[in-house]
Amino acid sequence: MNHQFILNFSPTGLIPTKEVTAEVPIRPAEIVEQVLEVADLGVNMVHLHAREIDTGQPTYKKEIYAEIIHGIRQKNKDLVLGVSTSGRHFFEFEKRSEALGLEGSLKPDLGSLTLSSLNFNKQASINSPEMIQGLARKMLENKIKPEMEVFDLGMINYAKYLIRKGLIKPPYYFNLILGNIACAQADMLSLGLMIRELPEGSIWSVGGVGSSQLTMNAMSLVSGGGVRVGLEDNIWYDEARTRLATNRDLVQRIVTIAKALDRSPYSHKEAREVLGV
């Protein structure tokens, strides 16, 4: 087993609002501050979502992503940064791919790539074959690595199809996200099947939706994988929902568990080398 792992931080997401939890970072300066704080704890990759400055609603605008990336890289140039191309709110290729056009010191290292359409509790994420391949092609052209989002086994099979078409190059990075109502459930059997199906040369992290986050993070550490953690997927510290979490709470707990298992996050430079970014 590799004793080092990817610690992928998802601070904001599309759903949590300040009305639900004051701890979620919405404005660029808040996101930057929280990213830099947990980078000192061991986070080596960040999965960024941007929000509109005035309303806090999800946005695709590259200017807001640029502000966040600039703020982080002013202080930490080695942290691996990814941007979202989500299909939950925006459906046009031009919007979903806009942040992939950032250049120079503002260019993201990764772009999210959900490998099929799926239903969440109250919303669909629409990802047509044409859209997935178009996003993968733009990432390839711009030398941005896909951060492949996988919610069930079929999505891994589609990743292999994209590899055969030459749209994705190794090393491959996957987020395995379990516990969503319409997808793979949060248990060891489902996780094991997904790990077994990954293409050779894959690097993977595991996240869990809601109360399954901690369980799936721990299962991944035991299984030799990485972790995706943050308020995007889960706003509560405990399963009984008596205490709202902070991003620092969630990251610190995972680092403590990892240490007990004799595992530690890659340094920021090591993560870049492993991922080839």
Image (cartoon, helix red, strand yellow):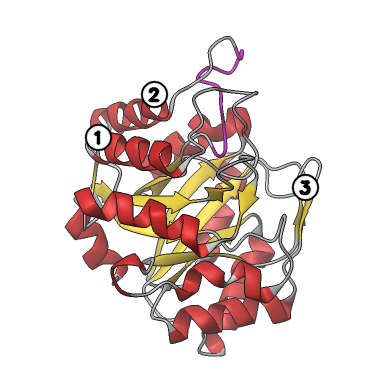
Amino acid type, residue under disc 1 in the picture: Leu
Q: How many marks are shown on the rendered structure?
A: 3
Q: Which residues are magenta?
A: 232-241
100 shown above or below 47: below
Q: Which residue is mark 1?
A: 41
The residue pinned by badge 3 equals 182
Residue at image location 21% in from the left, 57% down from the top? 77
- At 61% from the left edge and 38% from the top edge, which residue is drawn? 209
Which residue does the numbered mark 2 point to in the structure image? 249
- The residue type indicated by label 2 comes to Asp
Tell me what residue is drawn at x 53 percent, y 34 percent.
213
Residue 97 image point, x, y percent: 58, 72
Depth check: 141 or 150 in front? 141
Kindly report the distance in space between the C-alpha atoms of the residues bearing marks 2 and 1: 11 Å
Q: Is residue 151 above or below residue 220?
A: below
Residue 236 x, y percent position in the rendering: 55, 22
Contact (CB < 8 A) between labels 3 and 1? no
Answer left or right for 2 relative to 251.
Answer: left
Q: Nearer the viewer, residue 53 or 81?
A: 53
In this rendering, does residue 110 appear at all? yes
Contact flag, marks 3 and 2 (Cβ < 8 Å): no
Query: Can you tell which quarter of the image residue 170 is in?
Result: bottom left
Residue 177 magenta-drawn? no
Q: Amino acid at mark 3?
A: Ala
Front tag of 3 and 2: 2
Give the position of the C terminus as an image quadrant.
bottom left
Q: Is residue 196 above or below residue 119?
A: below
Estimate how packed mark 2 is, as few (under 14), some (14 to 19) or many (20 or more) residues with alpha carbons within 10 Å: some
Q: Is residue 6 visible?
A: no
